[in-house]
Image: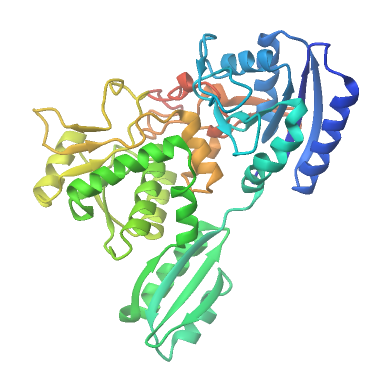
Amino acid sequence: MFKTASLVFVNDGTLEKKSTNIVHEFLVTHLTLLKYDVEKLVLTTDDEKFVASQLNELSKQYDILLVLGDNNTILKALARLCDEDLSLTEKVEPKHKCVCDLPSKAKLLTSNTLTYPVIYFQRIFILKEESAKDQFKEVLKSHLEQYIAPPLYKKFIQAYTNGNTKSVIDSIQDLVSVNVHKEQDFVTLEVSSEQLTNVVEVEQILASRLNRQFLYSYWDQESLKKVLDSGDQHIVKSLEVIERCMATYGPDNTFLSFNGGKDCTVLLHLVYAFLQVNYPDYKKQIFCLYVQGKEPFPEQEEFISLCQIYYNLDIMVVKSGIKDALQEVLTTRPNLKACFMGTRRTDPYSEHLDDMQMTDPDWPQVMRMNPILDWHYSDIWDFLLFFKIPYCKLYDLGFTSIGSSTNTVRNPCLSYFDDKLNKQVYLPAYKLMKESEERSGRNTVRKS
C-alpha cells in the first residue's frame, strides 16, 4: 500500500518564498489527512539534468512525488527521466491555458473547470504553483485517495438455498467478510477480503461444500464499470479493439493468451470487465491458452492458478512452442477464430503490428487481437496499481519481464542500496523509469 510522499519545489530563484510556503502548508496538511507521510525538498536550480537525477532518486524512496516550480525545467527533466528526446510532443488540449510540449509517456488529470491540468508520469505529479490548490481539490485528491486505499477483492457467489448454508457460511467467516443476500430459491454470498488468496480459497471451499447447489460466481459491477468508464485514452482504445472483436467473432469464438505476466494480466482484466458489463448473460468461462515454457517460476504458476478461480477461467496448458501450441488449440477447438494477446509495440518483432492482424501464412490461421499494443510500460503499471489489479508477486521482487526461471533474473536496473535497511535491495517493477530497460534481466543465466 502506498503511504509516503515527497513535495519537491524546483526554484530557479524567481519564486516568491511566501507563496511557496503557503502552497507547501496546504499540500502537507491535505496529504497528511489522506494518511500520507510527507517530506519536503527544495531544489534551487534550473539544471534539468540535476533535477532529473533528483527525481529519479526520490522516486526510489517515496511512493508519490508532487513537483512544483519551473515547469520548463521540470518537463525537460521528466523527458530525460523517462528516456525520451527533448523534442517533446504537444498533447495538452487547447482549452487549457498551459498548452505546452510534453513527453509522450506523460498523462493529464483534468476537469471541465480546471485551468491547468495535473501532468503526471507514473507516480510523479507536476502541479502549477498558482493553481496547486485547485488542482489538488478537483482532480489530484481523489487520485491519491485511490492509490493509498487498500485493495479489496470481492466476489458474489450464488447457490441454491439449502439447510446447510448457514454452517458453510460459519466456516468461512475467519477468511473473508460475508454479506448474505437471500432470494426466493437461492442465496447470494458477497465475500470480500484484502487478501486475494482468501477470496479464492473461500470460493473453492464453497464450490466443494455446496456441490450441486453452487451456481456460479461473478464480480461487483461497480468496480468493473470504474475501469470501463475511466476515460483514460489507452483504456478507451483497448476497449474499442475488444468490442470490435466481440462484435465480429462473438465471445464463444475468441480466446486469450495468458501466462501470468503483467501485460496479459491487464488484458485479462479488460476482457473480463468488458464481458461482465456488456454481456451480462454470458456465464461461460473465458478460455485461455497458457503456453508453458521450460521450468516456469513457481510464483508464476501460483498466480495463474489464483487467476483461474478469481476470473473464472478455462485454461488449456500446452508444453510446446507457440506455433505448435496454437495448432493444438485450434485443432481441439476449431470454432476459435480470434486470440487476444498482451503484445506491446515495444516487444521484440512487434513494432509494425496492427491491433487486429491475421497470423502469418505459414502459421495456424487465427486473428490476433492486440488491444494494448500502444501501451507503454508505465501505462501497464498505472493500470495495475490504480485499479488494485492482482499481479504476480515476482514483480515486487525486482523482476520486470518474466521468462523461464533458468534464464530470467531480477532487473539489475532496480538494484538499490537502502540506507534505512543498510543493505542492497531490489525495487518493485513499477519503480522502473526507463522503458528501454524493461527486458534487462531476460535471457540471462541464473546463478545457482
Q: Position of residue 12 (x, y in %)?
A: 79, 11
State left or right for residue 220 relative to residue 284.
right
Is residue 247 visible in the rendered image? The answer is yes
Give me the residue at 40% from left, 49% from top: 269
Q: Position of residue 435 (x, y in %)?
A: 48, 22
State left or right for residue 84 relative to residue 369.
right
How many numbered marks appear? Answer: 0
Pick the residue in front: 434 or 358. Answer: 358
Question: Picture quarter containing residue 41?
Answer: top right
The residue lying furthest to the right in this view is: 18
Give me the residue at 15% from left, 45% from top: 337
Is residue 321 visible in the rendered image? The answer is no
Figure check: 243 above or below 361: below
Give me the residue at 69% from left, 30% from top: 65
Question: Picture quarter containing residue 205?
Answer: bottom left
Give me the residue at 12% from left, 52% from top: 333
Figure check: 234 above or below 199: above
Pick the residue in front: 197 or 97. Answer: 97
The residue lying furthest to the bottom in this view is: 163
Figure check: 159 above or below 427: below
Question: Picture quarter containing residue 407?
Answer: top left
Q: Position of residue 268 (x, y in %)?
A: 36, 47
Q: Position of residue 52 (x, y in %)?
A: 65, 16
Colour convention of the picture: rainbow
Figure check: 46 above or below 111: above
